[in-house]
Amino acid sequence: IGGYVDFSVGAARSQGGKSIIVLPSTSSDGRRSRIVSHLSRGAGVVGTRAAA
């Protein structure tokens, strides 16, 4: 997600700011959910703790 770290940091530094990340939850045809109960080992999910 390009630039999400900048927006997260900006929200964190704003008085009362909250960072909300929104992603599509269904496949492109809208028929299947992309929400899963767990991630497989080695799944590529990255977000720095400093940006939280």
Image: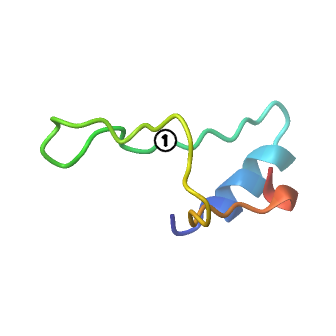
Find numbered disc 1 in the image and state the secondary structure of the residue it sits on: loop
* In the foreground, 39 or 15: 39
Horizontal relation, residue 31 to residue 48: left or right: left
Which residue appears farthest toward the top when viewing the image? 16
Toward the front, the furthest residue is: 41
Amino acid type, label 1: Val
Count of marks placed on residues: 1
Q: Is 41 left or right of 50, judged from the image as shown?
A: left
Could you tell me residue 6's position as x and y percent? Answer: 69, 63
Q: Residue at x 15, y 35 (%)?
A: 31
Snapshot quadrant of residue 19: top right
Viewer-side residue, 1 vs 29: 29
Name the residue beneath numbered marker 1.
22
How many residues crowd around disc 1 within 10 Å: few (fewer than 14), some, or many (20 or more)? few
Q: Residue at x 56, y 63 (%)?
A: 43
Residue 8: x, y in percent?
A: 71, 52
14 and 25: which one is in front? Answer: 25
Residue 1 picture location, percent across and down:
51, 64
Q: Is residue 26 above or below residue 4?
A: above
The image quarter containing residue 38 is: top right
Q: Residue at x 80, y 57 (%)?
A: 51
- Image quarter for residue 46? bottom right
The colour mode here is rainbow
Foreground pick, 44 / 16:
44
Residue 25 x/y as whole percent? 36, 38
